[in-house]
Amino acid sequence: MLVAVVTAVTSCGGKKDENSKSSSAPREKKEKYKDIYKGDYDKSKTFIVISKKDLLLTVYAPVKDDTVPVAQFPVCLSLNKGQKQKEGDMRTPESEPGEPFIIDAIKPAGDWTHDFGDGRGAILAYGKWFLRLKTPGHHGIGIHGSTNNDESVPGRASEGCIRLHDPDIITLKEQYARVGMPVIIKQEDQGLKSFEKKRFPLDND
């Protein structure tokens, strides 16, 4: 289903309140985007890994015989935990092993609005870009900004999409994302993958 409309039709929409205040504790200092790797790499071979456990989106790139983290962003994921089963269940889908999701479209979303059902009415909600994911069995899932819900990042408050801070969705789109880019979304308590353990050896599964 195409989402190129002013009032966005995505799985992040719906009648339920997505306000982060009801689902995540306040943080004294917001986590920020990190530019990790300064060397050269082939941007056509980069991919994304999203950790539900750590509330992080990491861009990876193969470099020689290694796989290195290039950049990292804090994210807000679905209010409810677990694998997505149906539309409206407030869950972020998890990719199957060896079958990553794909960014199949990048849409300008600066004028998209949504009514969260919390009394604010139809408000801007998606940031400048919506990176639509091809998620077999589900539609309307994407990576986007957090306009008017910035305090929800990082946290658990969306209806299924992946929210970034508004400046971060611009950085992700302009510096890293591309149509066709693989996106791995881990299971809730899944730890580091084999290629990640080389870089983050102190984190346990």
Image (cartoon, rainbow, N blue to C red):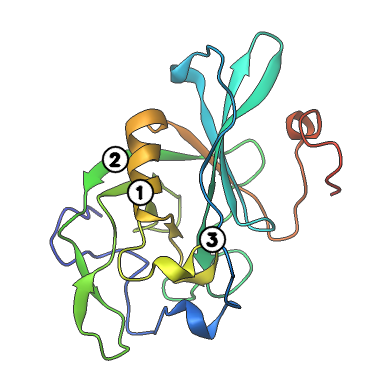
Identify the mark nearer the N-term, 1 or 2. Answer: 2
Residue at image mark 1: 167
Q: Position of residue 41 (x, y in %)?
A: 53, 14
Question: Are the two marked residues, 2 and 3, in contact with CB atoms closer than 8 angstroms?
Answer: no
Assess disc 2: are there few (<14), some (14-19) or many (≥20) residues with their C-alpha within 10 Å of its C-alpha: some
* Vertical position of residue 3 compared to residue 80: above or below: above
* Residue depth check, mark 1 versus mark 2: number of the one nearer the observer: 1
Identify the mark nearer the N-term, 2 or 3. Answer: 3
* Residue depth check, mark 2 versus mark 3: number of the one nearer the observer: 3
The amino acid on which the numbered mark 3 sits, given as a three-letter code, is Lys
Secondary-structure class at tag 1: helix
Report whether residue 119 is seen: yes
Q: Which mark is residue 67?
A: none
The amino acid on which the numbered mark 2 sits, given as a three-letter code, is Ala
Residue at image mark 3: 30
In three-dimensional space, the C-alpha distance between marks 1 and 2, rounded to whole angstroms, equals 19 Å
Secondary-structure class at tag 3: loop
Pick the residue in front: 61 or 180. Answer: 61
Residue at image mark 2: 105
Q: Position of residue 160 (x, y in %)?
A: 46, 65
Secondary-structure class at tag 2: strand
Q: Position of residue 87 (x, y in %)?
A: 42, 71
* Vertical position of residue 178 compared to residue 26: above or below: above
Quadrant in the rendering for residue 200 = top right
Residue positioned 45% across, 50% down in the render = 136
In three-dimensional space, the C-alpha distance between marks 1 and 3, rounded to whole angstroms, equals 13 Å
Identify the mark nearer the N-term, 1 or 3. Answer: 3
Assess disc 1: are there few (<14), some (14-19) or many (≥20) residues with their C-alpha within 10 Å of its C-alpha: some
The amino acid on which the numbered mark 1 sits, given as a three-letter code, is Pro
